[in-house]
Amino acid sequence: MMQQLKSKFKETEIGKIPEDWEEAIFSEVVDINPIRELKKNVESKFISMGDIERYNKKIQGYIFKKYKGGSKFINHDTLMARITPCLENGKTAYVDILSDGEIGTGSTEFIVLSAKEGKTISEFVYYLAISPEIRTKTIKSMTGTSGRQRVENDVFDTIIINLPFPKEQKSITKILSDLDSKIELNQQMNKTLEAIGQAIFKRWFIDFEFPNEEGKPYKSSGGEMVYNDELEEEIPKGWEALPFSEVVNVNPSRRLKKGTVTKKVGMADLQPWQSWIQSYQIAEYSSGPKFKNGDILFARITPSLEHGKTALVSILAEDEIAFGTTEFIIFSPKVIPSSVYIFNLVRDAKVREIAIGAMTGSSGRQRVPNECFDHIMLPVPPEQLVNRFDNKVSVMYKRISNSAREIDCFTQLRDSLLPKLMSGKIRVSVPG
């Protein structure tokens, strides 16, 4: 329970802190890269930098890999990116994917942080690591050439922190971790709904097993199929074959005056294989593609396209126009009247593979040209069938949108409470 306790404060080297807290050097209360015993060539769970999302406590995935070198950690350790731009982008995670006694391994570009018995508790160390004060100091301490800067371990010998006693640390982390649990629950629900929507799309429009008049799957129930020369495959009778750009608007015209202050979405604001926009900035429009609710943002560059960075816009007010990085292509309804249909279409493997194959440019900076979509031929279903799909699936995407707004609210609340709880400006009740 949070409360505004009338705490007495004392002056310290780092400013006023609660009288019953203490100053501490970070490395004296947190273990930096603690020793974990693991023999070379032993297979273990391996965490890459790509397995950690921006400002997300939860590790998103792992592979099994023979240990050759790199960071080693156990459950309840914290992994903190030490390199640019990963640290600035908030790549810090809490380890909870291992079994008891299991040792995981990861990128050499992680700093492993672990609690010291009697001084800190594990989750408090995680929230300490993502607090604005620690992030600012570690980012400023980076050394090395431009683009390859990293945090050196000895910076933690110079950082002084406010430290409550372990019982209060536990109360602080309970509040913050409860908010993170709500965020994670919403994210998991959204991913489940997305998977259901994609599965229905594939069954209806790729496998041609949409419900016939009797409610049975069309193709496997003997629905008439007709060979189409342009597609070089059989499609249901009554369907057409048209170029993508005749079916879907590619970079539709949207009016936005230069100098207008509005929402801006960058590539880092999209997460792989996630339909909703994770975050945005407020910025003055000068250039870049413009979009409104119901449009689709499609990453045109490598590796973002390969990583599935595609989003259905739902973060704007009615009639609001926002803009994004030039590395997005914008899609909107044209012949096909459904945004959720188009979103699932461009997420489908066939369209993505053709787009990836059409990329031009130097290695590492390849991008999809707009003309690519003049040459992608699509089997186009009747509008009535698309409307049936939209009616069935759009309700799920509305739930996703509402859930994403809750995620944003929980995230803002957590981020506003974090520095106040860590500084003692807001105190919490401690069980006796």
Image: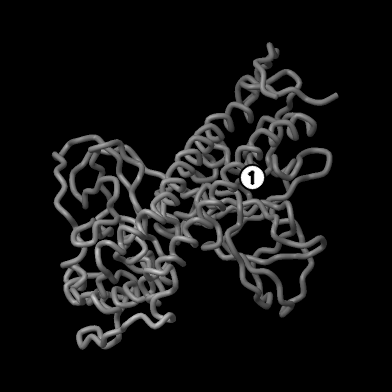
Among all residues in the image, which is located at the extreme right?
Answer: 432
In the image, residue 217 sits, relative to residue 166, either above or below, namely below
In the image, residue 229 sits, relative to residue 264, either above or below, namely below
Question: In the rendered view, does 64 fall on the left or right side of 382?
Answer: right
Query: What quarter of the picture does the C terminus occupy?
Result: top right
Instruction: Residue under label 1, please give it.
Output: 156
Q: Residue at x 30, y 36 (%)?
A: 317
In the image, residue 79 sits, relative to residue 134, either above or below, namely below
Question: In the rendered view, does 187 fall on the left or right side of 113?
Answer: left
What is the x, y in percent for residue 160?
65, 34
Among all residues in the image, which is located at the extreme front?
Answer: 214
Amino acid type, label 1: Phe
The answer to which image quadrant residue 19 occupies is top right
Query: What quarter of the picture does the N terminus occupy?
Result: top right
The answer to which image quadrant residue 320 occupies is top left
What is the x, y in percent for residue 266?
34, 51
* Foreground pick, 245 / 411: 245
